[in-house]
Image (spheres, coloured by chain):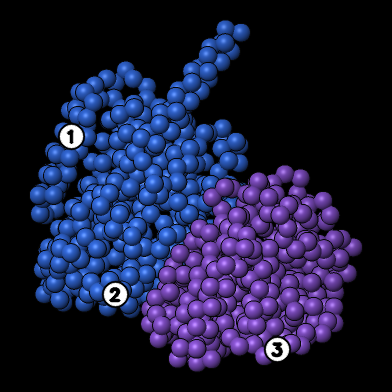
């Protein structure tokens, strides 16, 4: 049995249940890096190339956190997860494409990196293919791999179902693996707000100044794009002149457009990372679309290494005040 | 129709000819200036890369001059350049300019759309298919000729004895090419231009440093964006070789095309290619320049350019393994010419010292 480290960032928020189940079915121990802390971030900033965006720096930090505790770091090269986009070439941000190489060349004293290439647009069985590569590396037989793959698929499906019931990934993971209970709402929320952005920015409490708990405390019901099924989201593709090239960006854009069309949504918050390349397009596009969709209130928050809770809180509170004021007036 | 297009290096001469000879009126995009950049920065998203901002400024400038349609390129990603036109169109609409951006997507991605747009441009200009093909061919010849004289100028500049003579020769050659209207005239103008450059008074006893220029296509091709880096280096007495020319892929004589697949060369360092833009190329090209005995490499990229950041994080390993110094310049609207010059001078000093040390070591070895 070997210990497999999974960094608690980037794709973790969406695909962790699959890989956790897969590895555990193969009798491996899965080690998660600790939730983002100041030390992890500082370490990442030190290790990563200085021009990288904060999520990539954080990834380096999480890998460093795992390095001494595990036998392998699981850092797949995410190329695509579906055939989508105007030319069927949807992929991930170039930094995801080069991530295993960036990590390997930037950091010393790393355990072995599992850097399988995940390119699911190739065909239906591609994921099983990827799984066999990982399983082979761990010396598992074809039968074992297939069995693990099937139970992993099942768990991932259950996870998605929980997300569709308006849970955040952390809540859903808690329910899946720790048999947690859903916390009952104390009061009836008076505002409905959609928070869109990349999972690794909107669900990472440390980096976004705990915005989700802040909103909950302020009596706001939060929706994110991950609570929508692909079917609902992909309908939005035809409302754009051209889809984005990046999987997570497409989800953020489609989700935001969907929420803009819902009458019960009071406002949209887009959380973006400082100097994020894809978001330079996404953010302005959403801003313009929000205006075109009947002036729906839109707040964009850029986070970086220096983002503090207080700064985010001030802006969010101002936004909520404005929304409530607007409602009273009408 | 009044048509304009992005300004990228000297290619505008050929594209101007193309638009005019398709039966349209051409609004020639002015060379990007600080005014262009100011305009672009004001209206573009904050974190858009500098090519986006410069193009935004250019489009607003040509819109003021009356352009109705802007022809540009699309892309299949994952570099965001493929979405420029979408965002530019959004922003131009927001500013009520009435300009339409027509983007040619890569023909391999959407052949039908590509031909539809080509036909639209041809029909509105009133050309027959035969005439259209002829016009396109001459344009291509013109681009090739422009690249030809530019390449020679960078080769000759470090040898010139009167500073600026080569650059003046280049301007003259480009003017002659601008006036040429058919294949024969282009050939004549090119030969005349090449001769002009070869006749520049030179001191061939010099042994100039050799630096390869790699990076993102727009800032590499547009001198106004990279502060005329090749001319600057040339006048410091450095011979430069640029990895990208518009006609690169048809050439067999440039260093980058000599050894086949640049992605294959980059593979030991980057397991995925392409990663958008010229990210993977930059890594492969650094290796190629090292193999061809270049003294150093300058990587040019816009601030926050995604593929080049990936390349930048990997290049130190390449640089160490192959013993070739690499200077990375990230360019944004705050970059000043003096800043670029200071860094280049320091880099060139370092390379000269390195060469000296190497030569000395060589002699010591001979003595022993």
- What is the drawing colour of chain A? purple
Label 3 resides on the chain identified as A
Residue B5 shown left or right of residue B225 in the figure:
left
Compared with B283, A71 (above or below) is below
Label 1 resides on the chain identified as B
Looking at the picture, how far across and down is residue A34, in whole percent? 78, 61
Task: Look at the image and tell me whether residue A157 can be seen.
Answer: no
Along the viewing direction, whichever of A70 and A324 lies nearer the viewer: A324
Q: Quadrant of residue A284?
A: bottom left
| Disc marking residue B168 | 1
Compared with B306, A29 (above or below) is below
Residue B285 shown left or right of residue B317 in the figure:
left
- Where is mark 2, residue-wise? B93
Q: CA distance from mark 3 to mark 2?
A: 44 Å
Label 2 resides on the chain identified as B
Along the viewing direction, whichever of A135 and B63 lies nearer the viewer: B63
Q: CA distance from mark 3 to mark 1?
A: 77 Å
Q: Residue at x 37, y 50 (%)?
A: B333
Q: Residues within 10 Å of mark 3 (few under 14, many from 20)?
A: few
User: Residue farthest to the top?
Assistant: B367
Q: Residue at x 82, y 85 (%)?
A: A181
Task: Look at the image and tell me whether residue B298 can be seen.
Answer: yes
Mark 3 vs mark 1, foreground winner is: 3
Q: Quadrant of the N terminus of chain A?
A: bottom right
Query: How many labels, in total?
Result: 3
Q: Are marks 3 and 1 in contact (CB under 8 Å)?
A: no
Looking at the picture, how far across and down is residue A120, in whole percent? 61, 74
- Where is mark 3, residue-wise? A187
Which tag, 2 or 1, sits closer to the chain's start? 2
- What is the drawing colour of chain B? blue
């Amino acid at each position: 049995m070997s210990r497999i480290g999974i960094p608690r960032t980037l794709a973790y928020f969406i695909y962790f249940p699959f890989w956790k189940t897969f590895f555990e079915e193969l009798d491996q121990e899965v080690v998660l890096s600790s939730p983002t802390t100041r030390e992890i971030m500082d370490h990442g900033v030190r290790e990563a190339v200085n021009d990288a965006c904060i999520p990539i720096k954080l990834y380096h930090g999480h890998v460093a956190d795992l390095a001494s505790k595990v036998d392998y770091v699981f850092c797949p090269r995410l190329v695509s997860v579906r055939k989508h986009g105007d030319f069927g070439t949807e992929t991930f941000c170039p930094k995801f494409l080069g991530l295993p190489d960036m990590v390997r060349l930037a950091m010393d004293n790393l355990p072995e990196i599992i850097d399988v290439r995940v390119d699911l647009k190739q065909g239906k069985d591609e994921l099983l293919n990827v799984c066999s590569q990982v399983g082979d590396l761990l010396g598992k037989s074809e039968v074992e791999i297939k069995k693990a793959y099937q139970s992993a698929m099942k768990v991932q499906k259950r996870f998605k179902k929980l997300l569709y019931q308006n849970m955040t990934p952390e809540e859903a993971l808690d329910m899946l693996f720790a048999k947690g209970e859903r916390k009952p709402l104390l009061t009836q929320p008076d505002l409905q707000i959609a928070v869109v952005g990349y999972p690794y920015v909107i669900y990472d409490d440390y980096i976004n100044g705990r915005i989700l708990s802040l909103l909950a405390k302020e009596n706001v019901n939060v929706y994110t794009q991950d609570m929508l099924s692909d079917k609902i989201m992909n309908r939005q593709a035809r409302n754009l002149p051209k889809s984005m090239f990046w999987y997570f960006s497409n989800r953020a854009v489609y989700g935001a457009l969907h929420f803009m069309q819902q009458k019960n949504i009071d406002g949209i918050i887009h959380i973006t990372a400082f100097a994020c390349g894809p978001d330079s397009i996404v953010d302005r596009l959403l801003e313009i679309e929000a205006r075109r969709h009947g002036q729906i209130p839109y707040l964009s928050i850029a986070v970086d290494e220096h983002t503090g809770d207080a700064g985010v809180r001030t802006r969010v509170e101002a936004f909520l005040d404005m929304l409530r004021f607007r409602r009273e007036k009408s | 129709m009044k048509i304009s297009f992005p300004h990228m290096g000297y290619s505008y001469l050929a594209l101007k000819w193309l638009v005019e000879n398709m039966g349209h009126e051409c609004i020639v995009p002015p060379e990007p200036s600080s005014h262009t950049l100011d305009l672009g920065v004001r209206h573009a998203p904050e974190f858009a890369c500098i090519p986006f901002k410069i193009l935004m400024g250019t489009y607003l400038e040509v819109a003021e001059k009356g352009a109705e349609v802007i022809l540009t390129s699309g892309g299949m990603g994952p570099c965001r350049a493929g979405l420029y036109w979408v965002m530019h169109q959004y922003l131009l609409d927001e500013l009520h300019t009435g300009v339409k951006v027509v983007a040619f997507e890569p023909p391999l991605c959407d052949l039908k759309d590509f031909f539809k747009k080509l036909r639209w441009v041809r029909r509105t200009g009133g050309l027959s298919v035969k005439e259209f093909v002829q016009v396109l061919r001459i344009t291509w010849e013109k681009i090739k000729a422009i690249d030809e004289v530019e390449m020679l100028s960078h080769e000759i500049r470090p040898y010139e004895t009167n500073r600026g003579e080569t650059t003046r020769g280049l301007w003259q050659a480009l003017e002659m090419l601008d006036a040429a209207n058919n294949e024969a005239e282009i050939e004549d103008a090119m030969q005349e231009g090449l001769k002009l450059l070869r006749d520049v008074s030179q001191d061939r006893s010099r042994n100039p440093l050799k630096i390869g220029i790699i990076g993102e296509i727009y800032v590499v091709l547009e001198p106004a964006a990279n502060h005329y880096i090749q001319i600057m280096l040339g006048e410091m007495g450095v011979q430069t070789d640029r990895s990208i020319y518009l006609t690169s892929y048809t050439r067999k004589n440039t260093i980058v095309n000599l050894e086949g697949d640049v992605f294959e060369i980059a593979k030991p360092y980057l397991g995925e290619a392409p990663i958008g833009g010229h990210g993977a190329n930059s890594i492969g090209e650094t290796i190629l320049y090292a193999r061809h005995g270049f003294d150093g490499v300058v990587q040019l990229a816009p601030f926050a350019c995604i593929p080049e950041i990936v390349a930048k994080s990997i290049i130190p390993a390449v640089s160490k393994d192959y013993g070739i110094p690499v200077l990375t310049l990230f360019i944004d609207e705050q970059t000043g010419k003096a800043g670029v010059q200071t860094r280049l001078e320091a880099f060139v000093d370092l390379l000269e010292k390195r060469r000296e040390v190497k030569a000395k070591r060589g002699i010591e070895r001979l003595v022993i």
